[in-house]
């Protein structure tokens, strides 16, 4: 095998391994928010949610799985999109 083709093979192998690697998760937590008087389940932090939705926004709880966050929202508030209030 010629040296140039050997280097090409190593480069292709490295590229293949890189493409085969799993993509990192976007976030590992799901938060339940009351934003603009409606329940939302998002992967955002409180700061990100405040930036996206403004006030009033409050974080009600956080979970490691989306389904757990949805279950909490449904059990305590009737589900996403339902009415809520922050504060008093």
Image (cartoon, rainbow, N blue to C red):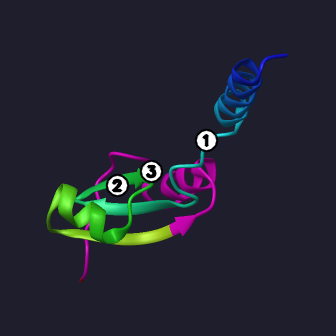
Q: Write the residue at 68% across / 39% down.
A: 22
Residue 15, by quadrant, is top right
Give whichever of discs 2 and 3 has the lower sequence position: 2
Q: Which residue was labeled with disc 3?
A: 78
Q: Which residue was labeled with disc 1?
A: 23
Q: Which residue was labeled with disc 2?
A: 39
Q: Write the residue at 17% across / 68% down.
A: 56
- Near mark 1 (Cα within 10 A), the count class, few <14, some 14-19 or many ≥20, is few
Are discs 1 and 3 less than 8 Å apart at CB? no
- Residue that sits furthest to the left in the current view: 55
Distance from label 2 to label 3 (Cα)? 9 Å
- Near mark 3 (Cα within 10 A), the count class, few <14, some 14-19 or many ≥20, is some
Q: Quadrant of the N terminus?
A: top right
Residue 11 visible in rendering: yes
Residue 23, by quadrant, is top right
Q: Which residues are magenta?
A: 62-87
Image coords of residue 2 (percent x, y): 78, 17
- Residue that sits furthest to the bottom in the current view: 88
Indicate left or right for 73 with 67 as reference: left
């Amino acid at each position: 095998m010629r040296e140039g083709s050997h280097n090409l093979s190593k480069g292709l192998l490295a590229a293949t391994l890189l493409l085969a690697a799993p993509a990192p998760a976007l976030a590992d937590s799901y938060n339940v928010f009351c934003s603009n008087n409606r329940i939302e389940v998002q992967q955002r932090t409180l700061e990100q949610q405040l930036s996206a939705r403004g006030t009033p926004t409050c974080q009600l709880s956080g979970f490691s799985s989306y389904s757990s966050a949805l279950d909490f929202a449904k059990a305590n508030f009737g589900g996403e999109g339902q009415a809520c209030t922050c504060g008093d």
